[in-house]
Amino acid sequence: MKYVIINGSPRKKNTWSMVKQAKTNLGEDAEFEEIQLMKAKIPMCNGCFKCIMETEEHCPHHEIVNQIIEKIKWADGLIITSPVYAMNVTGLIKNFFDHTAYLYHRPEFFDKKALIVVSTAGAGHKDVAKYIDETLRHWGFNKNYKITYACGGKDSINTEEINKTAQKFHKDVSSKKLHPPKFMDIIFYNAWKAMALTKDPIKPDAEYWKSTGLVNHDFAPEVKLGIIKKIFSKIMFFVLKKVMK
Ligand SMILES: Cc1cc2nc3c(=O)[nH]c(=O)nc-3n(C[C@H](O)[C@H](O)[C@H](O)COP(=O)(O)O)c2cc1C
């Protein structure tokens, strides 16, 4: 399997040692691409709105950001890391996420799975992992696994816990099986779909939802919905379409 690792720490230390341990569980034939965000030097998002209003190609930093997006497309699995900084993700991760705001409007990674790795001195690790999980779900990610660890005062990592989660991630990525979405994912899917179908939509959104055919589905067609979620999705679309006009 192919994995891309996006390291949101400016250094290769506590969080990276967790990644190194996780990697030992991903199979002998695993192929890795490594992106150190510190080295990628993505300029700060300047809030021009071009990615959203004119398509991502118009972002002034498109060339750098797109190299990372292309690696995610190439990979079967994403490993994304952040230490806790001031009770949140690092600025490196946040700045990268800001450059992907268009993916909220135009989600595309419906067949991808991720392993989220977060370290902290003492607190904030669960919330940070949850925030990364939510962001990836907005991009369309199908399933995310989380490894979090509070290193404060300890000089070793929790190898057993890391191995257990990494093995589950590896098994799931290898299976290529896609899981049904959460109810919240279905709500967001329909919100963006309804927005793309309003009288005066954001043009790239309307173009994307129509050209991909996603407007014709209750969720991305490669992800199967059970009958309850199917009905839920249809009701959500009906309601959101009415609200948005
Ligand atoms: C700027 C900065 C802010 C931090 N903020 C927090 C924090 O809010 N809570 C906490 O428990 N640890 C905090 N830490 C500690 C790191 O999360 C912790 O040492 C982490 O394991 C570092 O990971 P790394 O070695 O991969 O960079 C902070 C560290 C730095 C450098």
Image (cartoon, rainbow, N blue to C red):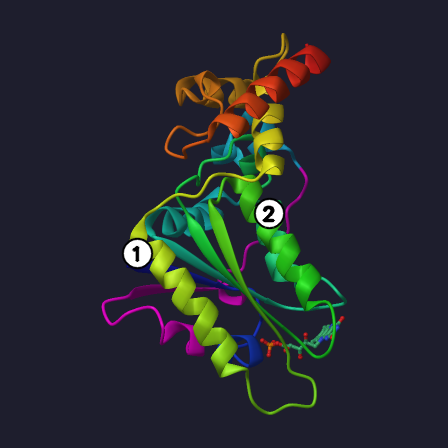
Quick check: 44 above or below 148? above
Residue 4, percent from left and from top: 39, 59
Residue 242, percent from left and from top: 69, 11
Q: Is residue 72 visible?
A: yes
Label 1 – label 2 distance at C-alpha: 23 Å
- Residue carrying label 2: 135
Residue 36, percent from left and from top: 48, 66
Tell me which segment is drawn in magenta. 20-47
The residue that appears at 48% across and 45% down in the rendered structure is 141
Q: Is residue 19 visible?
A: no
- Residue carrying label 1: 174
The residue that appears at 53% across and 28% down in the rendered structure is 228
Q: Quadrant of the C terminus?
A: top right
* Residue ranking furthest to the left: 29
The residue that appears at 60% across and 39% down in the rendered structure is 101
* Residue 225 placement: quadrant: top left
- Ligand 1's image quarter is bottom right
Which callout, 1 or 2, points at the residue further toward the start of the chain? 2
Task: Specify the amino acid type for callout 2.
Answer: Thr
